[in-house]
Image (cartoon, grey):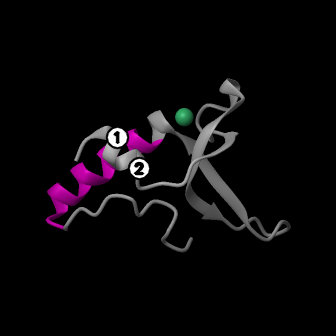
Amino acid sequence: MNQQQILALYEWRTGICFRHPGLGEVPTAVVGVIHPPAEGEHEVRACQNCVVAIEDMRREEAARAGFEYVPGQLGNCPG
Ligand SMILES: [Zn+2]
């Protein structure tokens, strides 16, 4: 699966990347949800480079651990 295919699995909206806040507003996808005690729910958004990097990491981890790698799942698991 190439980069474009992975990116196509996500819904992109303008936002701030959690790793690159200095870039300002860029196309981002939800890669997680955090629950700060006072604020209820907060989406963690990442830019295209970061989504590809995180998916790469997950693929390597899955290969090492012997799990099946399923792309496009970032942000879907609770916590
Ligand atoms: Zn980023």
Q: In which quarter of the image is the C terminus?
A: bottom right
Image height of 46 relative to 10, above or below: above
Location of mark 2 (residue) = 8
Q: What element carries label 1?
A: helix
Please state which of residues 11 and 21 is positioned toward the viewer in this rendering.
Answer: 11
Marks 1 and 2: CB-CB under 8 Å? Answer: yes
Disc 2 residue type (three-letter): Ala
Mostly what secondary structure, the magenta segment? Answer: helix
| Residue 58 spot, x, y in % from top left | 31, 53
Give left or right: position of 21 versus 10: right
Residue at the top extreme?
22
Disc 1 residue type (three-letter): Gln
Give left or right: position of 23 versus 58: right
Q: In which quarter of the image is residue 28?
A: top right
Please state which of residues 34 and 23 is positioned toward the viewer in this rendering.
Answer: 23
Location of mark 1 (residue) = 4
At 61% from the left and 31% from the top, the residue drawn is 20
Q: Dividing the image into four equal quarters, which quarter contains ligand 1?
A: top right
At 14% from the left and 65% from the top, the residue drawn is 66
The magenta-colored residue range is 51-67
Q: Is mark 2 on a helix, strand or loop?
A: loop
At 45% from the left and 33% from the top, the residue drawn is 49
